[in-house]
Image (cartoon, rainbow, N blue to C red):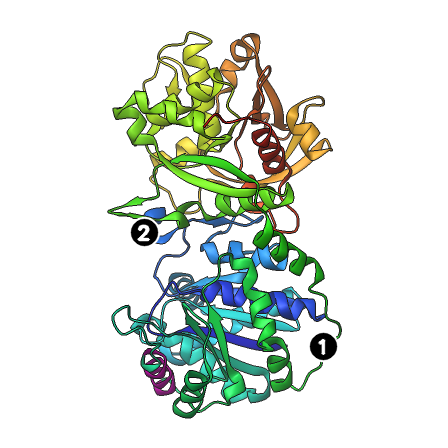
Amino acid sequence: MKYIFVAGGVMSGIGKGIAVASIGKILKSKGFEVTTIKIDPYINVDAGTMNPVEHGEVFVSDDGTESDQDIGNYERFLETNLSNLDYMTTGRVYQSVINRERNLEYQGRCVEVVPDIPNEIISRIKKAGKFHKADFVLIEIGGTVGEYQNMLFLEAARMMKLKDPKDVLFIMVGFLPVPRIIEEMKTKPTQTAVRTLNAAGIQPDIILARSPFELDEPRKKKLSVFCNIAKEDVISAPDVNSIYEVPVNFEKENLGNRILKKFRMKAKKNDMGEWEKLVKTIRTVKNPIKIGIVGKYFETGEFTLTDSYISVIEAIKHSCWFSKRKPEISWLSAEKYEKFPAKLRELKEYNGIIVPGGFGSRGVEGKIKAIEFCRKNKIPFFGLCLGMQLAVIEFSRNICRLKDANSTEFSPKSEYPVIDAMPDQKAFLKEKKYGGTMRLGAYNCLLKKGTESFKAYKKENISERHRHRYELNNDFKDILAKKGMVFAGVNPERDLVEIIELKNHPFFVGVQFHPEFKSRPLNPHPLFKAFIKASGNRIVKK
């Protein structure tokens, strides 16, 4: 196996994850088996207990791993399913070493930070590669090279390079700002980052130069001289309108072949045709479709944090491009609808509305009002996880006349707890066991023939990913059904409702799972395709 480490320069958030996903896509298109690993330097065991506003979306894999959103990008670009083996945190590594020490697996010797922590990191990297039978293992080290918490991961990378120099490659994603006042691209931040990486005993083999614009020859030459690499190994990585353009741009710079040459390997094939067609569609599609997302995790001061819903956003885009429509996505504040109900009228300006997942009571009543407005005004509606639960609450209150209907998450003493925690979840909550205890990962769902969902999937048995504690309370199924709610999908093992629908509506579907996690740019999710198709049929009056 060959190992490629990707580290960041002086600034986080400039695209290391997309760079790793893009390199993986390129190598896969050349006929190689590729897997990816994300390393996060925080002490948390996983991303499951972190606020999305602080860290972005929590991505869930089939096996129930709650991970960083970059794992989602890897899956989308590589069209693969990753697992617990492909995600690593400082907390997870230390926890493993401590458990092994407690079990006398170190045979009674003194266990030390170095080399035992780096050795555990190396062991995990090799285990993941072996499991996936990979030719290439791409490892993203989160954060930046100068951070104290990254030292042990860089040390592990250095140790691997020392032992097998022909099998390890280092790529650094450096930032080249263009200050507005000066209007000149500056290389010093990247030079400084390379020197910091050198101080950790690592020399980058390739630099991906992130900047608002393409690199010119003078800048490439300067980085080559001062960072001690060939000019051909300075790869221009300018801003793009769509992340899916990045692999195509890298190939223009011959990145794939540069990597193979360093490993003394040759491409088995070159197959980027479908991806290039996708990029052409993204660049040329013009017919707009307006989708509103009613949420609460995107407001942080004066800024909008779209990373909280990144998989939802990408799933919308995938299906829009499939339908040859240009996605126009707007963020709609649920709390605004609580304070100013009259503003609900703006929902008529959209082709379709999505209410995504979330936790806690903030903004819930605003989301319920938005769902009611979509139901009454025949606006295509798609509820994801919490969005489905709130659709059940709205229907219970306004159609079934259960005025106090609610979820026990928000109102523990509700007279009509139409959404409630399962007994096993109640036990976890009572014992305050929050980390990794939700209903997580892939579960089976049996679809009811004749429903919108069955028409979308075109099959009866499906599997989808979950992340929640609360479910539709089966005690209320009869009254909901009598009033017209359709239970389109049910988990056969535990008789849990997975999908609800309403008839006589252009599209009104709520799902207890997270379909966005399984959408791919070349293979959009069936329910998102159905939602976008229905939304595209709605004529919006200007």
Q: Is label 2 in a helix, a strand or a loop?
A: helix
Residue 505 x %, y %? 57, 18
Q: Amino acid at mark 2?
A: Glu
Give the prevailing secondary structure in the magenta stretch: helix
Image point (34%, 69%), residue name: 11
Q: Residue furthest right?
A: 268
In the image, the segment drawn in magenta is: 189-199
The answer to whether residue 482 is magenta is no
Residue 336 x %, y %? 29, 30
Image point (38%, 83%), residue name: 194
Across the whole image, how many numbered discs are drawn on residues? Answer: 2
Q: Is label 1 in a helix, a strand or a loop?
A: loop
Q: Residues within 10 Å of mark 2 (few under 14, many from 20)?
A: few
Q: Amino acid at mark 1?
A: Ala
**Quick check: marks 1 and 2 in contact, CB under 8 Å?**
no
* Residue located beneath label 2 in the image: 54
Q: Residues within 10 Å of mark 1 (few under 14, many from 20)?
A: some
Residue 478 x %, y %? 55, 11
For marks 1 and 2, give the one nearer the viewer: 1
Whether residue 202 is visible to the viewer of this picture, yes or no, is no
Q: Is residue 20 above or below residue 188?
A: above
Q: Is residue 171 above or below residue 34?
A: below
The Cα atoms of the two marked residues, 1 and 2, are separated by 41 Å
Q: On the rendered structure, is 305 left or right of 395?
A: left
Q: Quadrant of the N terminus?
A: bottom right
Image point (49%, 75%), residue name: 236
